[in-house]
């Protein structure tokens, strides 16, 4: 989905189109029944997932009141009835276990949120996280080294868009984004 389709706010973050496409692929939602979106922002990840997988139940968690308003507007705009909005700060109680967790923001509680996310996931469930800060990437990788995860993957995405400039064009860069994806280990008993 094009970024321009979403209602946007001045200080409300949004996972951009190219990053969102890769994140949704890494979440493996084709075989999921429940997705938790932590720090949902404008809801771009939740909404694109909801439209692509109408059978998927999505829990979108957001603490910023301005973002919650935009998230609600975007859900209405796209008629997404399979998204439950939770106003609050993760970690918090979520009734249903998840097959996928997307973390677009950590609010300074990164390692706590990684542990909580893994606790929410069914065995084999996917965790995907995006960061713009090198320090958060390093902290997440160091913490995950001691967690029950498999299929750990880390990528840096640098996207530039063709933009008019005078009589020509140039590629205007977006901020680099780091993405970590992994699966909660299967426990054999």
Image (cartoon, rainbow, N blue to C red):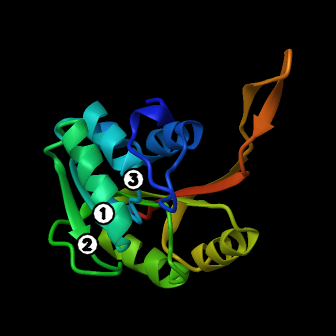
Task: Identify the residue at horizontal 38%, vertical 59% (top origin).
Answer: 40
82 lies left or right of 180: left
- Quadrant of the image occupied by residue 31: top left
Q: Which residue is situated farthest in the front direction here?
A: 166
Distance between the alpha carbons at the discs numbered 1 and 2: 7 Å
Task: Identify the residue at horizontal 50%, vertical 36% (top origin).
Answer: 21
Crowding around mark 2 (Cα neighbors within 10 Å: few <14, some 14 to 19, many 20+) is: some
Label whose residue precedes the other's in the sequence (3 or 2): 3
> Which numbered tag is attached to residue 68?
1
Residue ID for mark 3:
42
Task: Identify the residue at horizontal 53%, vertical 37% (top origin).
Answer: 17
Q: Which residue is situated farthest in the top direction here?
A: 167
The N terminus appears in which quarter of the rendering? top left
- Percent coordinates x, y for residue 130 in the rendering: 57, 58
Distance between the alpha carbons at the discs numbered 3 and 1: 7 Å
- Percent coordinates x, y for residue 178 in the rendering: 67, 56
Are discs 1 and 2 less than 8 Å apart at CB?
A: yes
- Percent coordinates x, y for residue 26 in the rendering: 49, 44
One can see residue 89 in this view = yes
State the residue in front, 187 or 123: 123
Residue ID for mark 2:
87
């Amino acid at each position: 989905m094009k970024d321009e389709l979403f209602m946007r706010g001045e200080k409300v973050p949004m996972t951009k189109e190219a990053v969102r496409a890769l994140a949704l692929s890494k979440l493996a939602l084709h075989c999921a029944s429940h997705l938790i979106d932590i720090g949902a922002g404008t809801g771009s990840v939740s909404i694109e997932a909801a439209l692509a997988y109408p059978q998927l139940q999505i829990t979108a968690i957001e603490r910023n009141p301005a973002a919650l308003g935009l998230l609600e507007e975007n859900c209405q705009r796209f008629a997404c009835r399979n998204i439950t909005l939770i106003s609050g700060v993760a970690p918090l109680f979520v009734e249903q276990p998840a097959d996928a967790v997307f973390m677009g923001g950590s609010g300074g509680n990164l390692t706590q949120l990684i542990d909580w996310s893994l606790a929410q996931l069914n065995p084999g469930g996917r965790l995907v996280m995006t960061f713009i800060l090198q320090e958060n990437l390093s902290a997440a990788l160091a913490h995950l080294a001691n967690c029950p995860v498999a299929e750990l993957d880390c990528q840096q995405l640098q996207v530039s868009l063709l933009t008019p400039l005078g009589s020509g064009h140039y590629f205007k860069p977006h901020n680099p984004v780091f993405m970590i994806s992994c699966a909660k280990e299967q426990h054999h008993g």
